[in-house]
Image: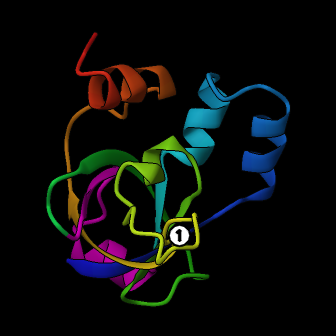
């Protein structure tokens, strides 16, 4: 399913990040998540997890799902954290800040592990070292 990704801080993401808890399980459960509208959630088969893939199809990440009425069909939200950073468009339009809002992505139901923050760094950014 092709959708637009928006990212941003949540109250709990900010509380945990500013409190130095980016490696905690609580942070992973708060941030390694993709919010979906009820209709989009149902069309994907009500999955526990989804794979979100960048528009160039070079990068993807498996995260938990959150079905919520605050989302409109065709839009998804992920807290701004290492999991969303894997798939956002890095182009900055000379502003120094990537596109955290309105990035085209693909979302599909997925099996597999939701990586910890450490494993995202080790496996995706450092080549498994």
Reading the image, the residue beneath label 1 is 100
Q: Position of residue 100 (x, y in %)?
A: 53, 70
Q: Which of 125 and 113 is in front in this view?
A: 125
Q: Is residue 51 left or right of residue 34?
A: left
Q: Is residue 91 left or right of residue 42?
A: right
Magenta stretch encompasses residue 83: no
Q: In this view, does 90 lie to the left or right of 123?
A: right
31, above or below 74, in the image: above
Magenta span of residues: 37-55
Please report the residue visible at 22 percent of the width from the left and 34 percent of the height from the top.
112
Q: Where is residue 107 in the image (x, y as percent from the top left)?
A: 25, 66
Q: Which colour scheme is used?
A: rainbow
Q: Position of residue 123 (x, y in %)?
A: 28, 23
Please report the residue visible at 36 percent of the width from the left and 66 percent of the height from the top.
89
Q: Count the marks.
A: 1
83, above or below 52, in the image: above
Q: Residues within 10 Å of mark 1 (few under 14, many from 20)?
A: some
Magenta stretch encompasses residue 45: yes
Please report the residue visible at 47 percent of the width from the left and 20 percent of the height from the top.
118
Where, by quadrant of the figure, is residue 102 drawn?
bottom left
Where, by quadrant of the figure, is residue 113 drawn?
top left
Describe the element under mark 1 as helix, strand or loop.
Answer: loop
Which quadrant holds the C terminus? top left
Q: In this view, does 96 lie to the left or right of 67?
A: right
Which quadrant holds the N terminus? bottom left
């Amino acid at each position: 399913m092709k959708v637009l990704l928006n990212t941003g801080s949540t109250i709990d993401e900010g509380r945990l990040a500013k409190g130095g808890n980016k490696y905690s399980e609580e942070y992973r459960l708060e941030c390694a998540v993709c919010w979906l509208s009820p209709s989009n959630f149902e069309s994907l088969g009500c999955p526990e997890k989804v794979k979100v893939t960048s528009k160039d199809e070079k990068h993807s990440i498996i995260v938990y799902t959150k079905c919520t009425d605050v989302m409109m069909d065709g839009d998804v939200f992920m807290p701004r954290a290492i999991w969303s950073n894997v798939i956002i468009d890095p182009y900055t339009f000379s502003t120094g800040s990537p596109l955290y809002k309105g990035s085209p992505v693909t979302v599909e139901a997925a099996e597999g592990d939701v990586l910890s923050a450490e494993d995202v760094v080790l496996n995706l950014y450092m080549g498994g070292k």
